[in-house]
Image: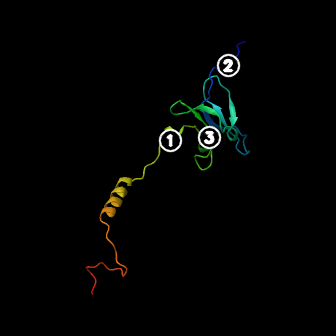
Amino acid sequence: MSKLKKANHPYHRFKKINIGAFNKPPYWVYKCTKPNCSYYIRCELATDQVCECNRCGKLMLIGKQVMTQNSSKPMTLPHCEDCTKRRKAPNAEKVDAITEFLERNKTEVPVDGLPPVLRKD
């Protein structure tokens, strides 16, 4: 009979899976995806665990951001902040240009609300 080899890696790479029974509430755990590793941990208890990033492979700490990334649910494949793709504002450059133009061409509006050209004195 052959024995199963013990996993020889110091850090795990997690994936979120549901191991709950049919017709029962979901039971979410993080499972290590490395070969010959059968490590499981409940998602609620995974905070402050050191693991590998699923995108770059560097070590990361599972923190509060990972646990509440998507509508207060843990990430399916946890990844570090460096691998997170942030959306840029679609017209950020145009907004900056307009703001700069308005700052340069600032005119003072008198108290009565009419510019000096339109006033009848």
In the displayed structure, would residue 6 be above or below residue 115?
above
Q: Quadrant of residue 36?
A: top right
What's the residue at 31%, 70% (across, down)?
A: 107
- Residue at 62%, 44% in the rendered image: 64
The residue under label 1 is which amino acid type?
Answer: Thr
Can you give x and y, in whole percent of width and height, for residue 23 in the image?
73, 45
Under mark 3, the amino acid is: Gly
Query: Mark 3 falls on what kind of element?
Result: loop
Question: Going by the image, does 12 lie left or right of 82?
Answer: right
* Residue carrying label 3: 63
Q: If you read the primary sequence from the N terminus, does the residue marked by circle 1 or circle 2 appear first?
A: 2
Give how far apart the Cα atoms at labels 3 and 2 are.
28 Å
Which of the marked residues, 1 or 3, is nearer the chain's N terminus? 3
Residue type, mark 2 in image: Lys
Q: Which residue is mark 1?
A: 84
State the mark number for residue 6: 2
Q: Are marks 1 and 2 in contact (CB under 8 Å)?
A: no
